[in-house]
């Protein structure tokens, strides 16, 4: 009987240790955790440039990143998170959007119709929030502006997750984040509707390299 009890206790302990390891897979600790977001980058920078068939070149230049309070982050085994302060507030390390440079290599004007385009980033897929918009118009196709690129010209655009809300307590606008994945699978995909001067259209798809936190950055400023 004692052997059975000991066996059951042992199995329970093993299950607890295993479940804890999974739940805490992305937890980071140490004095540098709050600044780890600064290390988020594209895993393969040499693959940031995408050439579309219509002569449009998309260059993923940088990322909009940061920390966001999320009490449920520790339940996600595939995201990086940490606790801060005496209360142990939980923050996840994530991405709000991407910066791109669009180059028109043709002799004709190009128009990117963002209201009929889409940004896929993590669990979000939808019309992007384009730099220069009003926060209250986030996610509204009718209020989403176009980007005009002259012949042989270029344009810099920032695209964000359009789930933006007003925080009454802090009295400021906040944008949703998608967490950086422990398995390095996070990437951004932009589906752009491109118009020429006579109204002909085609879709250009640009996919970024994987978005990661380099192991070297983790080893340098935190303790796993």
Image (spheres, rainbow, N blue to C red):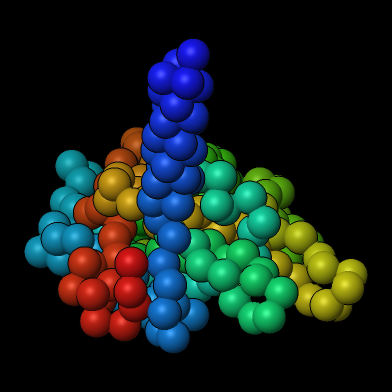
Q: Residue at x 42, y 79 (%)?
A: 30
Left or right of 143 on screen, residue 215: left
> Residue 136 versus residue 151: which sits nearer the camera?
136
Please say if 45 is above or below 4.
below
> Residue 156 versus residue 175: which sits nearer the camera?
175
Q: Residue at x 71, y 49 (%)?
A: 140
> Residue 149 versus residue 171: which sits nearer the camera?
171
> Residue 11 versus residue 76: which sits nearer the camera?
11
Left or right of 133 on screen, residue 63: left
Which residue is outermost to the bottom? 31
Residue 38 screen position, x and y as percent: 38, 79
Please say if 191 is above or below 2.
below
Left or right of 196 on screen, residue 170: right
Which residue is outermost to the front? 2
Q: Residue at x 55, y 59 (%)?
A: 177
The answer to whether residue 151 is visible is: no
């Amino acid at each position: 009987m004692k052997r059975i009890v000991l066996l059951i206790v042992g199995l329970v302990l093993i299950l607890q240790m295993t479940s804890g390891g999974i739940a805490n897979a992305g937890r980071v600790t140490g004095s540098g955790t709050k600044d780890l977001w600064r290390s988020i980058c594209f895993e393969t920078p040499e693959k940031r440039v995408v050439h579309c068939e219509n002569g449009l070149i998309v260059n993923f230049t940088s990322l909009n990143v940061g920390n966001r309070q999320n009490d449920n982050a520790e339940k996600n085994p595939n995201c990086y998170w940490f606790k801060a302060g005496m209360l142990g507030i939980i923050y996840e390390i994530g991405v709000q959007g991407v910066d791109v440079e669009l180059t028109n290599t043709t002799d004709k004007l190009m128009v990117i119709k963002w209201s009929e385009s889409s940004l896929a980033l993590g669990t979000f897929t939808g019309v992007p929030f384009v730099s220069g918009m009003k926060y209250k118009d986030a996610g509204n196709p009718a209020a989403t502006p176009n980007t005009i690129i002259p012949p042989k010209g270029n344009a810099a655009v920032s695209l964000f997750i359009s789930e933006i809300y007003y925080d009454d307590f802090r009295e400021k606008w906040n944008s949703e984040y998608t967490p950086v994945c422990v398995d390095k699978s996070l990437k951004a995909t932009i589906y752009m509707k491109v118009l020429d001067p006579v109204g002909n259209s085609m879709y250009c798809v640009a996919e970024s390299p994987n978005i990661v936190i380099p192991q070297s950055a983790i080893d340098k400023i935190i303790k796993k």
